[in-house]
Amino acid sequence: MIFMIFVLIALLILTSVFLFRKRKPTVKDAGLDNLLSSNFLDEHVAFMQELTADERIVFHQKLDDFLACVTITGVDTIVTPEDKLLIAAGAVIPIFRFANWKYYNLKEVLVYSDAINTNFQSVEGTERDILGMVGSGYMEGKMLLSKPALELGFANKSDKRNTVIHEFVHLIDKLDGDTDGVPELLLQKQYVLPWLDMIHKEMEKIRTGESDIDVYGYTNKTEFFAVAAEYFFERPDLFRDKHPQLYGLMQRMFEPPGRISGE
């Protein structure tokens, strides 16, 4: 009997050590708490300016949760605490109104010193079109980001662009099994057809130069959704004024009635 008690105690100790070593660092473990207590987020993340004091607490907790679950790695560059916090902010912004959200399809964010080519390497000069991407195949569960694009997305608050938000919206779109511009987890069935109709109309306006939505949104439905989401979160007032119907549909996705961010 005594022997069994010792065995159980030993197992409990080993289990505790294993869990402790496997646990990923939280914001405080990573030394980011000083940034959170400073004005860094207010100065760099426009979304923060619209939040109440209680919502800010929730936002900080969601940042902490994200950083505890997702590894952020510099491939050929140094990732600073500021970089990590901005990536986490870009992850939290689209899902802020959803309680207990986890990016189950993301394990690691890889940060590159420049744009990224199809071989997942930083490039200079000609091949500069990939500023971020969601991995697939053997890169499943990874997101790739260009560090300059990451920083620019939060430095320029008026250009309606944010690469980090763009890529996390792709991840959200992908959660239903298809990255097709129709996020079924966010969009109720009765709004799917109106959403598709809206996409086609807005893409045609982009083609004819009648829209201020970035021309990259004309690529396909998937990119339209991500580009429109950048605009929705970066310049919400302007987006609502310029595209009231589109704004209304996207508000149903990202700010659905009855959803409380901190519950």
Image: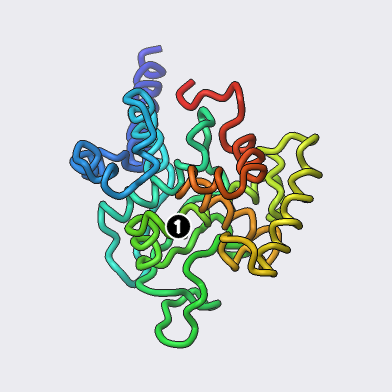
Q: Position of residue 172 (x, y in %)?
A: 60, 47
Which picture quadrant has residue 29?
top left
Of all residues, the one furthest to the bottom in this rendering is: 126
In the figure, is residue 150 to the left or right of 206? left
The spot of residue 141 in percent (x, y) is 55, 55
Frontmost residue, 258 versus 18: 258
Q: Residue at x 69, y 69 (%)?
A: 208
Figure check: 216 above or below 70:
below
Nearer to me, 223 or 15? 223
In the rendered image of this protein, does residue 12 appear above or below residue 82?
Answer: above
Q: Which quarter of the picture shows residue 7?
A: top left
At horizontal 47% and vertical 74% (from top left) the residue drawn is 116
Image quadrant for the N terminus? top left
Number of callouts in the render? 1
Whether residue 76 sits left or right of residue 259 in the image: it is: left
Could you classify mark 1 by the number of other residues whose Cα lies within 10 Å: few (under 14), some (14-19), or many (20 or more)?
many
Q: Is residue 175 left or right of residue 104?
A: right
Q: Position of residue 246 (x, y in %)?
A: 65, 45
Q: Which residue sits at x=47%, y=69%?
A: 131
Task: Tell me which corner region of the image, top left, top right, bottom left or bottom right, holds residue 51.
Answer: top left
Q: Amino acid at mark 1?
A: Asn
**Residue under numbered circle 1:** 162
Q: Position of residue 73 (x, y in %)?
A: 37, 60
Q: Relative to 78, is 32 above or below?
A: above
**Element on which disc 1 rests:** loop
